[in-house]
Image (cartoon, helix red, strand yellow):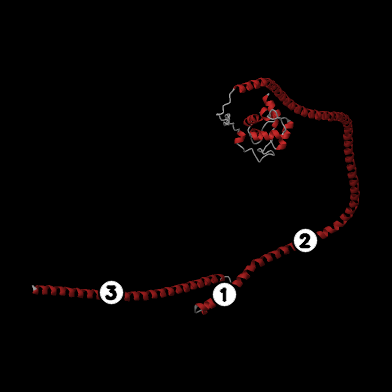
Amino acid sequence: MGWLFTKIFLALLLCFLIGLMIGLLWWWFDRKKETQVKDETSTLKSDTKKVAALESEIASLKASASSKKDVEAELASLKVSASKNKGLEAELAALKSKSSNTETLEAEVASLKAQLVSAKAKTEKIPALETELIDLRNRAQKSTRLESELAELKTASSKNSDLALQVSSLKGEASKVSGLETQLASLKAQAEKASVLEGEVVDLRSKATKVSELETQLASLKAKAEKASALENEVATLRDKAGKVESLETELSECKIKSARVGELETQNAALKAKAEKVPALENELAQLRRQSTPVSTVATSQPEVKVVPPTRPSKVSKAAEDTSWSTGTTKLGTLGANHKDDLKVVNGIGPVMEKTLNSFGIQSWEQLAAFTEEDIAKVTEAISAFPGRIERDNWVPQANELVEEFPLNKPYDRPTRETFLNKKK
């Protein structure tokens, strides 16, 4: 058994050694490859540097080649321009033979360019000189023509002297003609004025006949105007009377209402008098009943008094009291103010005098009357110094509510006055 374990141990040791050798060999090969790769990369870097240098050299060579091409192109252009100038061709030929490198050629090209510019400037002046030469030739031709015309004029001047004498005589006659023409023009102007004046005279005559007619019409119109003024005065007085009549009618209606109320009061007074006559008999009967009744001491004399309160009916809230959009501020009496003005005379029982009184306190709309409370009615009754119960008796509040419902407040304002309201009812 021990020998078997030793063999196994030795076999394992041998395997370990073999694996170690293989690992070392692998590491050595990897190391060698790394060194080779580093050497190759270094060589490649050097090669890339060389390539960059070569590229820069190639770029410089290209630039030089392009400069040479430019120079050759300039030389070609100079050759073309030099074909026009024989002197420049000779100089270029001499310079070509002498030029050995590009620097000397560039200097010579620059001088040649300057000369070429000057030559071009001179060539540009040539068409101007040609035009001047053409002008001079034309002037020379004109001068020959003028000389021939001058000769003709000299021959004609002798004839002109005779004509001058004739012209002087004609001028004298022409001065006489111009004088006659001025006289003729003045006479024509006078004739035109005369015709105009004749027309004016005819117009004035017709107007004079019209003036007499207008004077008669004016007299009749003045008489009519006097009558119209008198009628206007009468109309004004009638209008004043009509206003008084309206106020009297309202007062009359109020008086009628008061007289009807007086009749009711008289009937009530008669009934009260009849009742008052019965009072002594009732007092005697009450005294007899008191004497007949026996006093009971055990009954408490101070029993609490029972008050019978009548049931109150809920008052109907008016539409004007619910919606107070028409209201602004308060009146002098503390009631709701209004932002518009109605004709209060539409309400029966309110005449012009009463309307002015209510307006003086700030009451000027139907909504204000419709929104009256009992306190407001008491305040207004006291302020207008009216009979107590007049507002209730004339039904101001119900009438105002009916008017508010029948004629709602619109924009623009379209509520009726008393006259339009009565006309609608008719």
> What is the CA distance from the residue labelled 3 to the residue labelled 2?
116 Å
Amino acid type, mark 3: Lys
> What is the CA distance from the residue labelled 1 to the residue labelled 2?
54 Å
Q: Is residue 193 left or right of residue 327?
A: right
Query: At 67% across and 34% down in the image, what residue appears?
Result: 378
Q: Is residue 122 left or right of residue 27?
A: right
Q: Main secondary structure of the magenta part?
A: helix
- Vertical relation: 290 (above or below) 207: above
First-in-chain label (3 vs 2) = 3
First-in-chain label (1 vs 2) = 1
Graded by Cα atoms within 10 Å as few (under 14), some (14 to 19) or many (20 or more), the crowding at tag 2 reads few
Contact check, label 3 and label 2, Cβ < 8 Å: no
Q: Position of residue 221 (x, y in %)?
A: 85, 30
- Vertical relation: 231 (above or below) 118: above
Amino acid type, mark 2: Ser
Which stretch is magenta? Answer: 29-35
Disc number placed over residue 217 in the picture, else none: none
Question: Which residue in the structure is indicated by mark 1?
Answer: 112
Residue 368 visible? The answer is: no
Question: Which residue in the structure is indicated by mark 2?
Answer: 148
Graded by Cα atoms within 10 Å as few (under 14), some (14 to 19) or many (20 or more), the crowding at tag 3 reads few
Q: Secondary structure at mark 1?
A: helix
The answer to which quarter of the image holds residue 236 is top right
